[in-house]
């Protein structure tokens, strides 16, 4: 960002003579972006070797090695041991191959005290042999120098940018699809990674209700909206879910933490069309039981794909809530002779009539013997096909605003 330049020199006053090479130390600040430029000289004969390398760039390549705790970007330990390891080259030769007189580096977060290690620079001379994969073992070596490097802790600096994100408050907001009910459950950790325990509120959901779930994440200690950051980096994040008991009729199953292909009703996708999970839809079971609801946020930079799983990447949150069933929908339903369905038993098509509910504004649901919703129709006509349902006993529910009417029927064949 235009701060003071850090200069480190390695000199050999008598060239190939008996005097030892003297390499000065390198001291960099933590979590800082640097552009490195390299200059080479023959001071004995007054020659600018940098200019010669630029003129013969297709024959030369710089390789780098460094301690693993020194840099956030590039990560790893350099490309001396493996040419294909990442280095942020800024310059290329006339063939579009890397050179290395200019490179970019971002130092790591030191967290507790300074980080120390070595920084090794190798210049390879590879005339006629340089390629996209030619490495340390190809060609001659013009220089091979190691500096002592220290990345210094800055006590006055804010939390390091490359630390794991601090999320101390996660809010689940379940809003019923008709807007009649909103359920909020919070998990909070007042001191972040400190000694205080995570406090997780229960989730109290109503049976037989469609909810849209919105997740918000905060770092209240530093006043950061983590939700916004996830939206900006949605191609690196995905929420996974798991639940126990007969909580939901849709999605069915127990979630996609154990199997990423299991059903979850994601409403949002990243720029690549892959699910995120800040918004999802859930239908509670008509015979809902209590259980648990687990939410995990995975950080998957460069590895998120259609086949990535819960085992891939780092874990930003992994929280389990207790879910309680609020019995209001089913227990308030009663057989009502003012809803008539014929024939019953039925094979293919039901005919409905009711004095209490306006079918033109109502919603019809059919619930099987296990309590799962198997059919839903908005603004049903007075006849409905059920030929796709297997034989068995069902509950038909017609709902208009706060009024419910219900009847049982038997499907045969």
Image (spheres, rainbow, N blue to C red):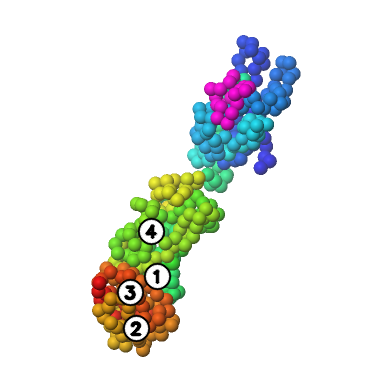
Q: Position of residue 404 (x, y in %)?
A: 35, 81
Q: Please indicate whether residue 375 sits to the left or right of residue 81 in the image.
A: left
Q: Nearer the viewer, residue 120 or 259?
A: 259
Give the CA separation, mark 4 to mark 1.
16 Å
Which segment is the magenta one? 116-140
Q: Is residue 39 above or below residue 328?
A: above
Residue 210: mark in rendering: 1
**Residue hosting label 2:** 352
Q: Which residue is mark 3?
A: 386
Whether pointer 3 and pointer 4 mark residues with C-beta atoms closer than 8 Å, the reply is no
SS at circle 2:
strand
Which of the 4 quarters of the picture holds residue 108? top right
User: Residues under labels 3 and 4: Cα distance?
Assistant: 24 Å
Question: Between disc 4 and disc 2, whose residue precedes?
Answer: 4
Position of the C terminus by quadrant: bottom left
Residue drawn at 38 percent across, 54 percent down: 261
| In this view, the mark in front (3 or 4) | 3
* Res. 263 mark: 4
Spatial distance from mark 2 to mark 3, Cα to Cα? 13 Å
CA gap, disc 1 and disc 3? 22 Å
Q: Residue at (64%, 34%) from the top-left corner?
A: 96
């Amino acid at each position: 960002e235009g701060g003071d330049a850090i200069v480190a020199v390695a000199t050999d006053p008598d060239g190939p003579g008996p005097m030892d090479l003297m390499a000065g130390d390198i001291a960099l600040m933590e979590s800082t972006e640097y552009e490195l430029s390299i200059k080479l000289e023959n001071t004995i004969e007054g020659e600018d070797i940098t200019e010669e390398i630029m003129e013969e760039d297709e024959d030369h390549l710089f390789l780098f090695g460094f301690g693993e705790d020194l840099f956030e970007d590039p990560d790893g330990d350099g490309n001396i041991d493996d040419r294909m390891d990442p280095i942020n080259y800024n310059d290329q030769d006339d063939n579009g191959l890397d050179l290395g007189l200019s490179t970019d580096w971002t130092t790591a977060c030191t967290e507790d005290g300074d980080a120390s290690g070595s920084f090794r620079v190798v210049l390879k001379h590879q005339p006629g042999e340089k390629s996209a994969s030619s490495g340390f073992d190809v060609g001659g070596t013009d220089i091979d120098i190691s500096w002592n490097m220290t990345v210094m802790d800055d006590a006055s600096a804010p939390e390091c940018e490359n630390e794991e994100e601090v999320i101390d408050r996660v809010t689940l907001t379940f809003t019923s699809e008709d807007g009649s009910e909103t359920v909020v459950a919070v998990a909070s950790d007042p001191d972040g990674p400190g000694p205080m325990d995570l406090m997780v509120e229960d989730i109290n959901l109503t049976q037989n209700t469609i909810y849209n779930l919105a997740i918000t994440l905060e770092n209240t200690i530093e006043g950061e909206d983590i939700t916004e950051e996830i939206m900006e980096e949605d191609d690196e994040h995905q929420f996974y879910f798991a639940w126990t008991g007969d909580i939901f009729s849709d999605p069915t199953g127990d979630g996609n933490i154990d199997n990423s292909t299991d059903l979850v009703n994601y409403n949002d996708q990243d720029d690549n069309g892959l699910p995120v999970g800040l918004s999802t839809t859930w239908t509670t079971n008509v015979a809902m039981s209590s259980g648990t609801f687990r939410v995990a946020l995975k950080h998957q930079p460069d590895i998120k794909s259609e086949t990535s799983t819960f085992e891939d990447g780092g874990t930003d949150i992994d929280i389990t809530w207790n879910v309680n069933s609020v019995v209001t929908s089913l227990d308030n339903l009663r057989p009502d002779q003012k809803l008539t369905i014929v024939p019953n038993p039925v094979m293919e098509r039901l005919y409905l009539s009711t004095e209490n509910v306006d079918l033109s504004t109502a919603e019809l649901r059919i619930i099987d013997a296990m309590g799962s919703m198997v059919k839903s129709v908005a603004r049903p006509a007075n006849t409905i096909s059920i030929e796709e349902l297997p034989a068995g006993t069902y509950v038909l529910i017609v709902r208009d605003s706060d009024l419910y009417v219900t009847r049982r029927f038997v499907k045969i064949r």
